[in-house]
Amino acid sequence: MKNKITCIIVDDEKEAREGLALMVSKIEDIDLVGVCSNGIDAIYSINEYNPDLLLLDIQMSQINGFEVLRHIKKHPAAIIFVTAYDQYALQAFEVHALDYLLKPFSDHRFYDAIDRAREKIGHRRGRAEIQALLAETKKNERHKDSVYYTKGASGEKIVIKTGGNIHLVPVEEVRYVEAYDYYIKIHVHSNYFLIRETMKNMMVKLPENIFVRIHKSYIVNLNCIAEVENTSATDTKVILNTGEQVKVSRTYKMELIERFK
């Protein structure tokens, strides 16, 4: 069974340990990972296994149950005290014990406490899963590719976030943007950045006074255009100041011409 509840029993009486172990063994979704006869062994076992459920005696030689709780790294989700003494009940709940079983107790009383423990452990696991998911989401957001435009005292920049790194690229160094399957290539100098983005979103993010779309697959920096050339009655291309040639589609040709008026 997946996601079994891990459990440790701590009691200095052999008969009590064996009785609790027998009762726990009958519960299908509980995995008994440790049985301890004293507080010192309990501290080591709890820190090692980090159990979900702790069945803990109180009065033990050397180290009692409360001292065990003070010396472990992390409290289990459900702590059930199992003791023959009723005078510790208030103290038990002050350390957030789920239940206090007073020996001798009935099977019904024991399994009722286990049901409550199962519910509490389920809630903690649910919260832990949500927290883990949120943490993973935040982590992914930190490393998610993105690009945006910013203008400040240091000038106009295209901020490119990719592979966990952030690049601040002056606008004038971005020659053109090219569609590349489900990605885009942002061409800068003799290099390019490959980003998971759409051309439509890029047109919204880039400053419209500097960039123009000339093709479904190309957005060009107006300041990088050296020449617009009609190669035929229907075909047009732009030649960049680097010598690169980029095709202009008929759909966007008029917009390009308007930008140069």
Image (tube, helix red, strand yellow):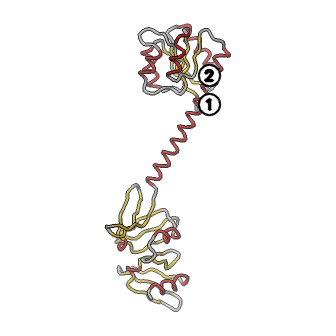
According to the picture, the residue beneath numbered tag 2 turns out to be 114
Residue at 48% over, 12% down: 37
Residue 109's place in the image compared with 210, above or below, is above
In-image side of 2 versus 179 (left or right): right
Q: x%, y% of residue 213?
A: 49, 77
Q: Quadrant of residue 104?
A: top right
Residue 86 image offset from top left, x and y in percent: 56, 10
- In the picture, the quarter occupied by the C terminus is bottom left
How packed is label 1: few (under 14 Cα within 10 Å), some, or many (20 or more)?
A: few
Q: Secondary structure at mark 1?
A: loop
Q: Which mark is residue 224?
A: none
Residue sitting farthest toward the left: 154
Q: CA distance from mark 1 to mark 2?
A: 18 Å
Which residue is depicted at the point 45% across and 63% down? 195
The picture places residue 9, in percent across and down from the top left corner, at 53, 17
| Vertical order, 38 against 229 (above or below) | above
The residue lying furthest to the right in this view is 108
101 and 224: which one is in front? 101
Give the position of the N terminus as an image quadrant.
top right
Which residue occupies 60% across, 18% down?
24
Q: Residues within 10 Å of mark 2 (few under 14, many from 20)?
A: many
Please provide percent x and percent y for residue 85: 54, 9
Looking at the picture, which amino acid does disc 2 mark?
Ile
* Amino acid on which the number 1 mark rests in the picture: Met
Tags 1 and 2 in contact by the CB under 8 Å rule?
Answer: no
